[in-house]
Amino acid sequence: EVQLLESGGGLVQPGGSLRLSCAASGFAFSNYAMSWVRQAPGKGLEWVSTIFISGGTTKYADSVKGRFSISRDNSKNTLYLQMNSLRAEDTAVYYCAKGPDSSAPTGFDPWGQGTLVTVSS
Amino acid sequence: EIVLTQSPATLSLSPGERATLSCRASQSASPYLAWYQQKPGQPPRLLIYDVSNRATGIPARFTGSGSGTDFTLTISSLEPEDFAVYYCQQRGNWPLTFGGGTKVEIK
């Protein structure tokens, strides 16, 4: 069974940093792109970042570019999101998701349960 | 950036009725359009990818269609477990974007 388990969320002050982790199991992690998607309380979904297979290519939403950094450790089947210079508007549940991929299924599938990040003084 | 606009924001229907959800893109999103279902307190679940392909385990009552800038998710006969929020998403252009969602609620 494919599983994604996020950790590392919590309460942080504005301007602070946090590192999220996503432990993957049940599939060949190193063969797939991986992404982070967030959801502010009561709001819709916002794509944050994607990292491709080797980790050499990454993509970011403009809202986090220059502040967040996505990485992966294929030897540990783990995805990371380093978040710096956090703002109140970064408060959200952060989901780890497999994909997107060029082969079926091409969407984000599956998703982890999410980890809550709260930025507040 | 491709902006996805979903309508209606809320759809009030009874079990057994047909649901038709719309997703309009600001530029062509074919064929890279997906649909997700999200229930309260749960992560989203992939329903449809590449406009019309059902993900593994998704019942046949869910159908995706459309092309270019206009896409539709149809639920042929609502089951109690289908009342949820639905999002469309495109992967054809960076940044990847989601629509604002349609809530399907019990009438």
Image (cartoon, coloured by chain):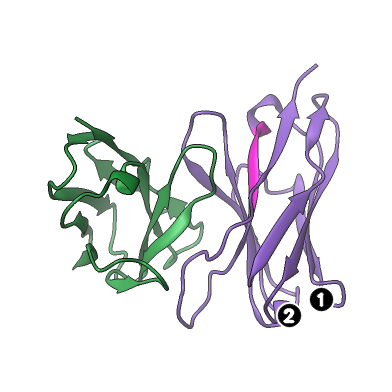
Q: Is residue A92 left or right of residue A101?
A: right
Badge 2 crowding class, 10 Å Cα cut-off, few under 14, some 14 to 19, many 20 or more, is some
Q: What colour denotes chain B?
A: green
Q: Chain of mark 1?
A: A
Chain that appears purple: A
Q: CA distance from mark 1 to mark 2?
A: 5 Å
Q: Position of residue A6 (x, y in %)?
A: 74, 52
Q: Is residue B101 left or right of residue A38?
A: left
Q: Chain of mark 2?
A: A
Residue B78 shows in this picture: yes
Q: Secondary structure at mark 1?
A: loop
Frontmost residue, B41 versus B96? B41
Tag 1 residue: A74
Q: Earlier in the sequence, mark 1 or mark 2?
A: 2
Are the residues flagged by discs 1 and 2 in contact, CB closer than 8 Å?
yes
**Residues beneath discs 1 and 2 located on the same chain:** yes
Tag 2 residue: A30
Q: How many numbered marks does the figure carry?
A: 2
Residue B68 shows in this picture: no
Question: What amino acid type is highlighted by mark number 2?
Answer: Ser
Toward the left, the furthest residue is B17
Per the rendering, the mark at residue B58 is none
Quarter of the image containing the N terminus of chain A? Answer: bottom right
Q: Give the residue displayed 27% in from the left and 34% down from the top.
A: B105
Q: Position of residue A51 (x, y in %)?
A: 68, 67
Frontmost residue, B79 versus B50? B79
Numbered range of the magenta stretch = A90-95
Indicate whether A109 appears above or below A102: above
Magenta-colored segment: predominant secondary structure: strand
Frontmost residue, B101 versus A55? B101
Question: What amino acid type is highlighted by mark number 1?
Answer: Asn
